[in-house]
Amino acid sequence: MTLDHPGTLRGRLVTLEPLAREHHDELVAAVQDGELWRLWYTSVPSPDRMAVEIDRRLELQRAGTMLPFVARRNDTGRAIGMTTFMNIDAVTPRVEIGSTWNAAGAQGTGTNPESKLLLLQHAFDVWDCPAVEFRTDFNNQQSRAAIARLGAKQDGILRAHRREPGYLRDTVVFSITQPEWPGVRLGLEHRILRHLAASGSLDGEAPPLG
């Protein structure tokens, strides 16, 4: 079994597009919103390293271990960050959703939970994954809280797991399993509907997600 790139995934708040070198300038503008690369516990590319990061992700795609996306807000049309399917195990099948960052101005807008919903739908409903994994730095409390809000459960902590500039990172591992997916889906859909209602975009009965 191979897990091919699903192509563009469209939601009501955000669209995930296959990453391409042509996204470079838009991603530089996005990463400058909040200067996220300055946070020591994140691995966000700086503007001058964006081209290298794009090439790195595309090379991993060619190797079959990553399927990268660019996230784009539907209301403004602006690119707001990157996300991926990574550490792909096509035999089980199992994937990790990670290497994600979002511009500061997009945080709290519902685009991140909908991005996760789009990716989880594909992993569970198309690929029939028994589990989907999330990982983050132990020190990244914002990321840990966001993953937990998705409905993922903590599996454990990998101590001294990876060398980062200046320190050894402890990695917190979360996952969502196939039996948990229906409840997680409902929770994410409810969060997205709240954002649509708050923005005035919810007119009458909400259309189905997908």
Image (cartoon, rainbow, N blue to C red):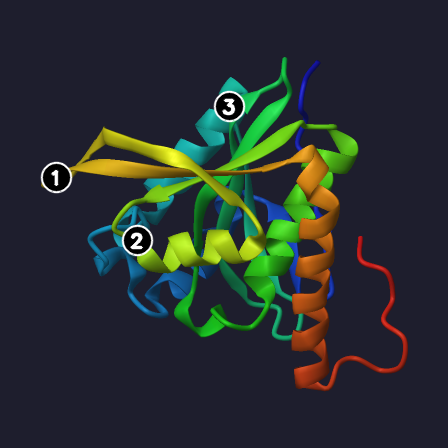
* Horizontal arrangement in the rendering, residue 48 relative to residue 205 (left or right): left
Can you see residue 163?
yes
Tag 2 near tag 1, CB within 8 Å: no
**Which of the two labelled residues, at mark 3 and mark 1, occupies the earlier sequence position?**
3
Q: Which mark is on residue 65? A: 3
Tag 3 near tag 1, CB within 8 Å: no
Residue pointed to by mark 2:
140
Q: Label 3 to label 2, Cα distance in Å?
A: 24 Å
**Which of the two labelled residues, at mark 2 and mark 1, occupies the earlier sequence position?**
2
- Vertical order, 132 against 186 (above or below): above
| Residue 201 % position (x, y) | 75, 81
Q: Amino acid at mark 2?
A: Asn
* Residue at 51% over, 23% down: 65
Residue pointed to by mark 1:
167
Q: Amino acid at mark 1?
A: Tyr
Q: Quadrant of the N terminus?
A: top right
